[in-house]
Image (cartoon, helix red, strand yellow):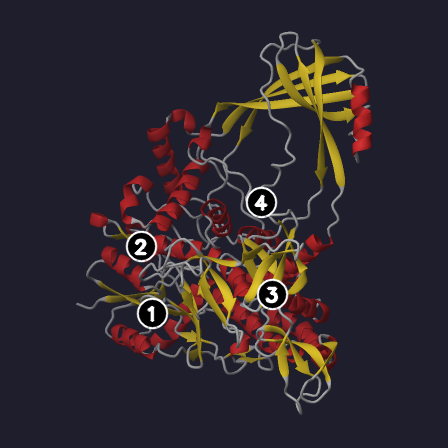
Amino acid sequence: MEKSLIIVESPAKAKTINKYVGKDYIVEASVGHIKNLPKSKLSVDVDNGFQVTYETIKGKEEVIEKLRNHAKHAKAVYIATDPDREGEAIAAHLAEEIKPVNPNIQRVLFHEITEHGIHEGMKNPKSIDQHLVLSQQARRAMDRLVGYKVSPFIWKTVYYGLSAGRVQSVALRLICEREEEIKNFIPEEYWSIIGEFKTPQNEVFLAKLVKVAGTDPKLPDETTVKGYCTDIKNHQFTVTTISKKTVKRNPAPPFITSTLQQEAARRLRFSAQRTMTLAQKLYEGVELGSEGLTGLITYMRTDSTRLSEVAVTEVREYIYNNYGKEYVPREPRLYKKGKASQDAHEAIRPTSMKFTPKSVKKYLEKDLYALYELIWNRFVACQMTSAEYEQVSIEVEGGDYLFRATDQVPKFRGFLQVYDDIPDENGNGTEDADPVSSLPTYITEGQQLSVNGLFPRQHFTKPPARFTEASLVKELESLGIGRPSTYAHIVSTVIDRKYVEQRERKLYATELGMEVNKLLVTYFPEIFNVKFTARMEEELDTIASGKQKYEKVMKDFYEPFHRAVEKASSQAVTIKGSLQTITEEQCELCGKQMIIKWGRNGKFMACSGYPECKNTRPLPDETEIPEHHLGEQCELCGGEMVLKSGRFGSFLGCSNYPQCTNTKSITTGIQCPKCKEGMLVERKTKKRKRAFYGCSRYPDCDFATWDKPIDRQCPECNHPYLVVKTSRTKGTVYQCPECKYEEQKTEEIAASA
């Protein structure tokens, strides 16, 4: 009897699906993309309708041949790659290879890898959506054109090997502009006055001065505050208003990709890439003992908060049985569709309410369990009743002065039983928050109060917080830049290119990143800006929906882009000269002046007589980089910590040196695999200044590696990190140092051409 062939991307997913479809099907994996744009040439024909040329990825010939052999003898072929644009593009490439041996090809979508999800997908086969394929092709073509046209300009002006990406460069611009805001920020002083009042029953409470003569108080300095305090003491104060009301707090919507990345960063301290790797595992299937391989969550790349009726019914029943009927709202909660939402998939949710976190905990490793529990709790909470508080507000008046005290008393926790709030990751609002004290039990309007004390508080306005991965993803989403499948890659790319550094979970623009951003913004202002990039995302969406043609969208993008490239390239030599600094030092070989230039390892000194004289030398050791003020205080003397570079790489040093010699290493955020106590930090060798990574506890721990570690767990052996490997044949890949698992970077970097 002939069997049908189902093709998916992942071997893990193939194994899970095979359990549900039965003996009439063969399930095979393409192991990701089978075709890609060649790295050695542009491969986008701008003179022929922007047609692209794909080639088979090296090493995928055997996979294709295996799939063709199965397809040749199959009753039908069902392509079940991921249900998004990239998955649709992979499906189109697979169909192209298989069609000559079996034209009976259909597309199926699995939004959850469960028995129900598989059967639903198989019941509703359809044709490959060419609009989605062309939308993905347009994204690839735009990215390739930017990478291959702008990167050479960066090579000519800064140094060879740098690259520029269409979306990543806009993310870099946001980070650099935030860096400039922080650098140029001038704190402004302001004050507040807290009054301590006592009732006739000797109950004491705190209240804040909120009005002076009916207007907001202006308290710019200590002198003004002292004057007010002196006058306040001359007045008799009375309780003028006591108001009580019930306030409600509603639960947050279920997770979409961006909010999952943000909350996982905030609560679990996962990088965006780490979150998506773990979510992929939960989606594709986890071994659950007698249950076998089971997908635990729905598809994790989504911008929709929509939930199926079946899922909502299940969770409402679960809430009723586990928390009580008072926790189930009368009607299911519906959440508004986001402005840019494609609404192609459901929100991220558990696939079944029978797989409670407690029941699956023993099958999941620590991080996988933590993420699953987070998704579970958010989903359950989103369909629970609101939390209720009794808010009491007391206003106290004397002369021209009005003080106010507010308190909230929980009446019903509602959804907070499942998904409680935690402080903002930047600590926003905590320092300047109003004082909290219990309000008096026996207090009535018209009651006379005595002023027990006045407490002036000095404050300073703060610069905007540096982006974290989570807040950058939130910003990109709000601006309409990128899509669920691209957020994690955008962040990891600017870090991989050394344009951005991550320290203590905050993103800092490097000097190189600032320089490259300045060039891109100056010479490509219309291309690397937020509005243009957001508009291009919308244009890609119109291709996906069939409203616009591929060629028109590409033409609208390419014509202004090409003009900008031509203009910038004509000025490359002049620009390069403007980036070099002439020093007073002379070359010890030929006597000409030395200049400061950019190179792969940062700035260095070179002879101005190049190419006749090729003398170079490093910059003097421990050169401060003044642009990088960190807003971090030295724990020894209270001075500002600044970024410095020395013989062994970058480090944090006190700005009060030499009076204070305090220094700190800059960590990668990855724990040392040897001692499990220190963190891996970047260092440089003495002679060749070659970068390597070693334990921060050296010499107590001597672990060291040449390979750059990235915060991403190996999907095969669960080693805590992968390393970056580069070769001529493979290009740049991520490799596990333990089991040698490898994966190709999904988006090519133009500099590798």
Tell me which amino acid carries mark 3: Ser
Residue at image position (40%, 47%) is 371
Q: Secondary structure at mark 4?
A: loop
Which residue position holds label 4?
426
Q: Quadrant of residue 174?
A: bottom right
Q: CA distance from mark 1 to mark 3?
A: 33 Å
Which residue position holds label 3?
645
Q: Are marks 1 and 4 in contact (CB under 8 Å)?
A: no
Q: Quadrant of residue 175?
A: bottom right
The residue closer to the viewer here, 245 or 620, is 620
Q: CA distance from mark 1 to mark 4?
A: 37 Å
Which residue position holds label 2?
285
Mark with earlier residue (1, 3): 3
Q: Position of residue 316 (x, y in %)?
A: 38, 34
Mark with earlier residue (1, 4): 4
**Dot 3: few (<14), some (14–19), or many (≥20) neighbours within 10 Å?**
some
Q: Secondary structure at mark 1?
A: loop
Q: Position of residue 370 (x, y in %)?
A: 38, 46
Mark with earlier residue (2, 4): 2
Q: Is residue 407 left or right of residue 413?
A: right
Q: Is residue 437 visible?
A: yes
Mark with earlier residue (2, 1): 2
Residue at image position (63%, 33%) is 433
**Dot 1: few (<14), some (14–19), or many (≥20) neighbours within 10 Å?**
some
Decide: is 331 above or below 53.
above
Tell me which amino acid carries mark 1: Lys
Tell me which amino acid carries mark 4: Asn
The residue closer to the viewer here, 358 or 252, is 358
